[in-house]
Amino acid sequence: MKKFLLLFLTIGLFLSVGNPILTKSQQPDYVKYGRIATAVVKEDYPGEEVVDYQYVGRQKLSNTVVMDSFSFQVKENNKPVTVIVKISHSLNNKKLLNLTVEEKKA
């Protein structure tokens, strides 16, 4: 009886924690490009504070190519700067095709 209870609790614990492999595969595909956009902004503004980050949305460029846009709020010399990063990528092979960075001073 104790072995059955222990087995039941172990299975319950495993199910409540979840499977990290399954969780990673369920992330939206724009998450990968958001990490790339964040790295680019941190590289372009070294030592500056990234105050806010937002996924703006997706634009379909063709049947196989989309563009994801991300907006960052950066404090550069204590002045707010909005940085828009647009990343075009293929839906077929999941590869980045083009990346643009646009700065808008407030």
Image: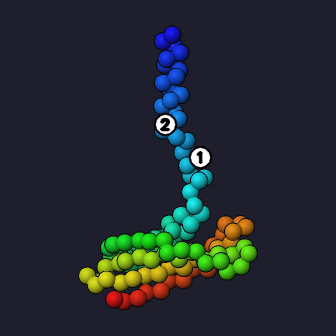
- On the image, the x and y values in percent for residue 67 come to 60, 77
- On the image, the x and y values in percent for residue 34 come to 51, 68
Q: Nearer the viewer, residue 9 or 47?
A: 9
- On the image, the x and y values in percent for residue 30 come to 56, 66
Question: What amino acid is labelled 2 in the image?
Answer: Ser
Apparent side of residue 69 relative to residue 52 in the rendered image (left or right)? right
Q: Residue at x 37, y 77 (%)?
A: 73
Inter-mark Cα distance, 1 to 2 = 13 Å
Q: Is residue 6 above or below residue 11?
A: above
The quadrant of the image that shows the C terminus is: bottom left
Question: What amino acid is labelled 1 in the image?
Answer: Leu
Q: Which residue is label 1 attached to?
A: 22
> In this orientation, does residue 7 appear?
yes
Q: Residue at x 53, y 35 (%)?
A: 15
Which of the numbered marks, if any, corresponds to residue 16? 2
Number of numbered markers: 2
